[in-house]
Image (tube, grey):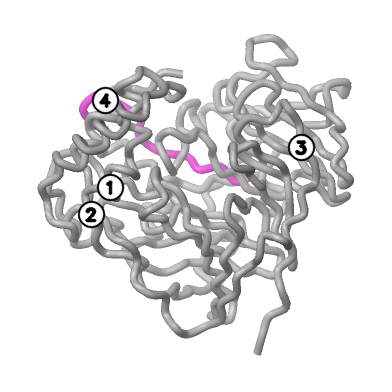
Amino acid sequence: MRFPTVFVVLLWTTAACREAPPAADVSGRSTVIDASRVTVVGTSESLASVRDLSVMEDGSIWVLNSTSPFFLHFAPDGTVLAAYGTEGGGPEEFGSPVGFVDGGVQGEAWTFDSRRHLLVALAGPEAPRREVAIPRIAVPPGSIVSGGDLLDPTIRVGRLGDEIVLPRSGAAFEPGRLVEFRLSVLGADLVALDPATGTTRVVVSLAEALDDPAGDFEPVVSGFPLWFRLWSVCGDGIAVYDRGAHRVRRFGSDGAEATSLAPPPVPFEDATPLQFARAVFPLRMAEVTGGVDGTLTAADSVRLLNQMAGALSASPAELGAYLPRYVDLRCDDGGAVWLRPLDLDGGALEGARTWIALDPDGSRTEVTFPERFDPFVFSGDRVWGVQRDALDVASPAWVDLPPAGP
């Protein structure tokens, strides 16, 4: 997969500086989960990089792989029940599966195929294929795009009752208009599709419902901000991070705002040139090597990193504003919203190990997960995710959250 050079060039000209976040707000609870609490479900030699994960009611796990086979189905005891899904144009193949429908559909895992612009049920390679076409007039092909890291094609899709919620952007990418395109992605309409009737409705227009994310943002260089679009179906409504107001806004299924929650203070304001260079290094490397799978020698990587850091001239505060504060938002069965801050020292646009859980009553808890454990699904007192070993080999796994303290 080649990465459009214009994305990398414009992105690098926005290069910002960052520094480690200040100490967390002392209010609320905090807990650290030890690595010994991780239970690995199973593994497979077919797993490369896990893009998404879905847990079924019977405890089995579907994993979206970054390469063929795209889908692996693990039984609760770790047995691989199915491994299938190849890229192509055939009737049983997939164009570009980019994420699961959060929560599944009627107890089954479903995926969104962005290239074919449809939803596909996952029941195994031997089961008859079932698809739901997405109305092309209401939701044009190409209007559902990733709202996060430009190198990550994963797209959040959620289930709201009997409807499936899709993020529809209004502007197509045009050369020279990357800023407008990115802002359109951030202000997407969250459109609910009824699979039974094919009808759609806008639940929430992020551009209209949220504060202007730019606020007093001053573009000190050409390019565009790297902010993420963060939302999730949360119970019978939708939760969204509002960057402009620094709030988590919750909307009912009818689109009316229900509550607004306050996270801790903004996790960071400034950054150093080296921190920023580390954050966007994969993007620059993709340009240099001609694709997202390219590699550089250790010496070339250090040289490129130093060149990137040395090219930055704006102040840490000015350029730090270009960066996302949080890189993920998810909800659990109890209605709590989980936010993952950006890890300024982790490299790439990676998330920190510590997540912030905001309960519906406004109380909050900070939970630090073990190293190399990537959470995907928050279910009751259990968090399902992926445990990566020292070689980044991934395995589905889970951890139990400790009981809430006083």
Figure quadrant of the C terminus:
bottom right
Q: Pointer 4: what residue? A: 6
Relative horizontal placement of residue 41, taking residue 180 as reference (left or right): right
Q: Which mark is residue 276?
A: 1
Nearer to me, 371 or 177: 371
Q: Earlier in the sequence, mark 4 or mark 2?
A: 4
Q: Amino acid at mark 3?
A: Thr
Quarter of the image holding residue 298? top left
Q: Pointer 3: what residue? A: 43
Q: Amino acid at mark 4?
A: Val
- Does residue 284 show up? yes
Q: Amino acid at mark 1?
A: Phe
- Check if mark 4's residue and mark 3's residue have beta carbons within 8 Å: no
Q: Amino acid at mark 2?
A: Thr
Q: Which mark is residue 272?
A: 2
Q: Secondary structure at mark 3?
A: loop
Closer to the eye: label 4 or 3 = 3
Nearer to me, 310 or 77: 310
Query: Real-space Cα distance between discs 3 and 2?
Result: 38 Å
Q: Secondary structure at mark 4?
A: helix
Magenta segment main secondary structure: loop
